[in-house]
């Protein structure tokens, strides 16, 4: 199996320097990372959720669904997409599952290098 097919995990920490995520667009190992970031960030609701989760506070699904006036199922879908990409973390407490942004401290912008290898 080739290395490109094996790449499922997004390792943000490895590509972060001074709060900037650097990815070379034409570097095959970055294809899955770039595709996943672009897909996640292309959803307006996911961007809104990430913006709201930018604070140090944790939020739970019901509060987010009330805030955005969307069904809990819709919010849960978007939260699961963000979690799958490694952009948020979650933990369960007795009154619900709480979500928090993972990359708040690490990434302030994303730079994609378009130059050839």
Image: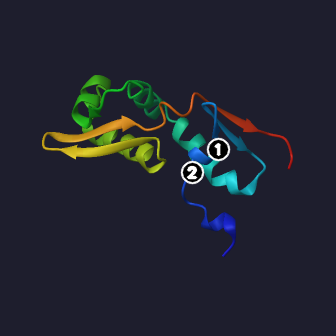
Q: Which residue is mark 2?
A: 11
Q: Residues within 10 Å of mark 1 (few under 14, many from 20)?
A: few
Q: Name the residue rendered at 38%, 29% in the picture.
A: 53
Using the image as rendered, state which of residue 73 and residue 2 is in the foreground: 2
Q: Furthest-right residue in view? A: 116
Look at the picture and state if 79 lies above or below 9.
above
Q: Name the residue rendered at 72%, 38% in the picture.
A: 112
Using the image as rendered, state which of residue 14 and residue 63 is in the foreground: 14
Please provide percent x and percent y for residue 85: 49, 47
Q: Which residue is mark 1?
A: 15
Is mark 2 in CB contact (under 8 Å) with mark 1? yes
Q: Residues within 10 Å of mark 2 (few under 14, many from 20)?
A: few
Image-quadrant location for residue 114: top right
Look at the picture and state if 104 lies above or below 34.
above
Please provide percent x and percent y for residue 42: 55, 36
Image-quadrant location for residue 56: top left
Mark number for residue 30?
none
Q: Furthest-front residue in view? A: 18
């Amino acid at each position: 199996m080739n290395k490109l097919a094996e790449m499922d995990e997004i390792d943000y920490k490895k590509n972060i320097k001074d709060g900037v995520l650097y990815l070379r667009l034409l570097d095959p190992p970055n294809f899955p990372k770039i595709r996943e970031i672009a897909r996640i960030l292309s959803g307006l609701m996911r961007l809104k959720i990430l913006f709201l989760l930018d604070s140090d506070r944790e939020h739970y699904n019901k509060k987010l669904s009330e805030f955005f006036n969307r069904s809990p199922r819709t919010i849960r879908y978007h939260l699961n997409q963000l979690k799958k990409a490694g952009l948020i973390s979650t933990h369960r407490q007795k009154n619900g599952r709480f979500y928090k942004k993972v990359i708040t401290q690490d990434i302030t912008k994303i730079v994609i290098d378009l130059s050839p290898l």
